Amino acid sequence: MANSPILKGEPFSEEKTREIAEQFFRDGFVYLPGVLTHDEVTALREKTDAFFDDPELAERTNPHLADVRYIQMGSHAESGETLPFILRNTIELDPIFRDMLLREPILSLAEAIVGENCKFCGQNVLRNLPGLSISTWHVDGSVHFPVTEKMPRHDPRLRMPVMWFTVQMALSDIDTLEEGPTQYVRGSHYSGRGPNTQENPEFEGNKPESIFCKAGDIYLQDPQCWHRGAPNLSNKTRYIIQSQYAAYWAYWRFSLCNDVPVADDDLENSSDRLLNLLGRSRTTA
Ligand SMILES: O=C(O)CCC(=O)C(=O)O
């Protein structure tokens, strides 16, 4: 990291780290102003724009990755025009992105939330050109701990388990609703359900809250807390870098355990069912 534009940074005090983690467990998100410097933000944005401008990268895919593309396209909310939207597999592209994973106080917060020896599980840059956003209310993936119809919610005395989570880092100012802030419904990770409606979802009286922020601010997101990016109705481009960290046990169980190097040749005569079960695709000669 010696010549990196990304600083090493400093962890918060143990007490502050613990308080932030407690707030995260209770609310499902936490906003922390003023973490990245102006120079870091500028370097990350410039690098992001350079990759979005690279015609070779726009075409590149890798079938062995969870996200096979490096540049994911999105549809303009009104015109339907297809536009470049999400830069994926960033850590392969440049050390600046790898350095962001170690940046303090981010890594120590990740350890306070998902546990020591936590593992990388994703990084993207959202570049919301005007008209682009992930504006559907959702939880990431599926509801991990669904309740039955008869249960109103999870018991508030429980701390909902966090297998992985996202650190959202603003690389541009997001000052107004028109600029498409991230929105959360506080406490909704305790609902045991997906968002109750797409029109102003509500959980026990908690309504959508917008994260208005400046470039360099960060916020922590439980993927089970109802959230979305509000539509970008402005003429400004919005930039958010997302780093994702997982609990060590989840990495061990879901990444290491299924990574047994059975040679492709040995699987040549296997059924589609076995290949699918192993997460392997049939290699063509
Ligand atoms: O644009 C945003 O801030 C929301 C991103 C989001 O919903 C997601 O990454 O799951």
Image (tube, helix red, strand yellow):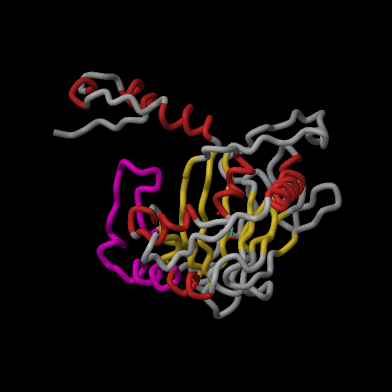
Q: In the figure, 273 relative to 243: above or below? A: above
Q: In the figure, 234 relative to 263: above or below? A: below
Judging depth in this view, the residue of 49 and 243 nearest the camera is 243
Q: Residue furthest bottom?
A: 235
Pick the quarter of the image with the N terminus: bottom left
Residue 235 belongs to magenta span: no
Residue visible at 63% across and 57% down in the picture: 228
Tell me which image quadrant ligand 1 sits in. Answer: bottom right
Residue 8 % position (x, y): 49, 60
Residue visible at 71% across and 46% down in the picture: 18
Residue 273 appears in view: yes
Judging depth in this view, the residue of 248 and 230 nearest the camera is 248
Q: Which residues are magenta?
A: 44-71
Residue visible at 46% across and 53% down in the picture: 123
Identify the image quadrant of residue 181: bottom right
271 displayed left or right of 19 = left
Residue 23 % position (x, y): 75, 49
Residue 139 % position (x, y): 63, 46
Pick the quarter of the image with the C terminus: top left
Residue 52 belongs to magenta span: yes
Residue 55 % position (x, y): 27, 67
